[in-house]
Amino acid sequence: MNEEYYLKFPSVFKEKLRSGEIQFPPDTKVQYESRIAYRGIEREEADNTPVNRSDLRSYAELGKKRAPRGGRYDANSPNYYGCSLFLNRAMVENRMKLPRAGWKLANICVKEEGGPIQLNEDTQHLCWWLYESYNEFEASIIK
């Protein structure tokens, strides 16, 4: 991966890549088969706005520093700059305690045109580093 490739990412991640502070993990995949993954998104019960880029922002893009229960996010981890999804629907529902007020479950087609991924086979966690200009989402809100 090179300087020109890094320019495809949101500025908060792009600058870390360009400076060498952050590197993609060795098991990052740039070419892969499309797959369905799940993510909890903030939505009030009556809000049926289609899934969009703002639903898939990373912790870095959201400016999150503190994790739930008093922990801290690791801003030195490349995963802090990626969108967190799961291949297993039940994993998202359990981790986020869904259904709950203000949140809905979305299924999203993860495509290589959107950016590279890292998949943890054991946890079924998928980190998707979205290109800044990617907006071609095939997604729906399940509940």
Image (tube, helix red, strand yellow):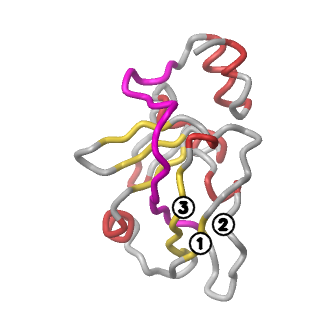
Q: Which residue in the rendered view is the most extreme toward the bottom?
A: 46
Q: CA distance from mark 3 to mark 2?
A: 8 Å
- Identified by mark 1, the residue type is Ser
Task: Report which quarter residue 90 is drawn in.
Answer: bottom left
Q: CA distance from mark 2 to mark 1?
A: 6 Å
Dots 3, 2 in contact, CB < 8 A? yes
- Identified by mark 2, the residue type is Val
Q: Residues within 10 Å of mark 1 (few under 14, many from 20)?
A: some
Q: Is residue 7 left or right of residue 108?
A: right
Give the x, y percent position of residue 118. Answer: 42, 36
Q: Which residue in the rendered view is the most extreme toward the right?
A: 133
Q: Is residue 95 left or right of residue 31?
A: left
Circle 3 residue: 108
Q: CA distance from mark 1 to mark 3?
A: 7 Å
Label count reads 3
- Identified by mark 3, the residue type is Ile
Circle 2 residue: 51
Dots 2, 1 in contact, CB < 8 A? yes
Circle 1 residue: 140
Q: Secondary structure at mark 2?
A: loop
Q: Secondary structure at mark 1?
A: strand
Q: Which residue in the rendered view is the most extreme toward the left?
A: 122
In the displayed structure, 23 sits above or below 129; it is above
In the displayed structure, 93 sits above or below 88; it is below
Task: Report which quarter residue 91 is drawn in.
Answer: bottom left
Q: Which mark is residue 92?
A: none
Which residues are drawn in magenta?
23-41
Whether residue 28 appears in magenta in the rendering, the answer is: yes
